[in-house]
Amino acid sequence: MGLRKSFAKTAVLAVAASLLLGACQSTTMGGAVGAQRKQLLLVSSAEVNAGSAQAYQQSLLKAKNSQALNSNKAYTRRVKDISARLIRQVAVYRPDAARWNWEVNVFTSPEVNAYCMPGGKIGVYSGIIEQLQLNDDELAAIIGHEIAHALREHSREKISQDVAQRQGLALVGALAGLSQGQMDMANMAGQYALTLPFSRGMETEADVMGLELMARAGYRPDAAVSVWRKMAKLGGGGPEFMSTHPSHSTRIADLSAHIPQVMPLYEAAQRKR
């Protein structure tokens, strides 16, 4: 009997391991910076995108009701123009993203924040423009970073990691029919995109991918470094080992190391302008 139980357990683990390996893939091509790390993806893009779209519409309605949606015409024009140039470059990582239903909006709020939800729903808060006094190149660095999160589907990856940690191999064995679990995970999408932090690795990945996007769009890559220098002066964030985000100094060092890699892309974009 003991042998039977041991065999059954081994068989279940083997099947679960096979399913986990099958769920590991890269959401993007590598681009010039080689962003094609394998990711654990236990939920579908459709589920996450649906939940994100719902959360985004709710945020738009709330902002509209408080007259905080695109109320500053100058900011709105800048953000939409910069976003459009960056979006034209997304096919280098994934051609399907060029066909996403992209939306770009500006929220009047003192919050120093911006995001791009799964499926291409961009939100920029006026506070990040004003408090950091961002020029167009620096604003492109912020938006490019957020677009990179969406291209890599980091929210989907985080949900998948959370599911794997909370539910364990039992859920993996039932992946063919997620039923109620699917709905719960789709509803999590907005929360993950808007409020929960990404991992250090994801943040670093988005930094580097965003650097390439802005260079290809003709924005100065070194502006990404100046953004984080401004962030450091603004304050916030503790020691790196206590945070899910890289420290400002680490981000500055990583971005600086990749600037020579993307400078030819920036120079080529400048010659076309």
Image: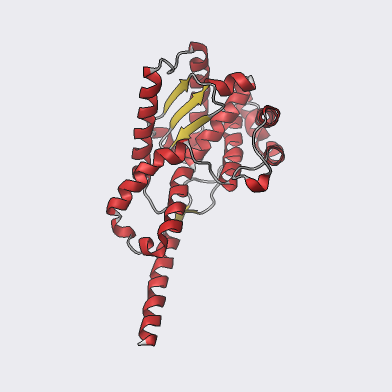
Rendered residue at 40%/64% (across/down): 169
Left or right of 73 on screen, residue 208: right
Count of numbered tags: 0
* Quarter of the C terminus within the rendering: top right
Rendered residue at 54%/21% (across/down): 110
* Residue 134 image position (x, y, % from top left): 62, 21
- In this picture the colour scheme is secondary structure
Position of residue 248 relative to residue 64, above or below, is below
Rendered residue at 66%/48% (across/down): 241
> Between 90 and 124, which is closer to the camera in this rendering?
124
In the rendered image, the residue lying farthest to the top is 73
* Residue 204 image position (x, y, % from top left): 61, 43
Position of residue 213 relative to residue 156, above or below, is above
* Residue 212 image position (x, y, % from top left): 60, 36
Position of residue 197 relative to residue 15, above or below, is above
> Between 61 and 209, which is closer to the camera in this rendering?
61
Quarter of the rendering containing residue 129: top right
* Residue 89 image position (x, y, % from top left): 51, 32
Left or right of 24 on screen, residue 238: right
Q: Is residue 88 visible?
A: no
> Between 89 and 68, which is closer to the camera in this rendering?
68
Q: Is residue 22 visible?
A: yes
Left or right of 213 on screen, residue 69: left
* Quarter of the N terminus within the rendering: bottom left
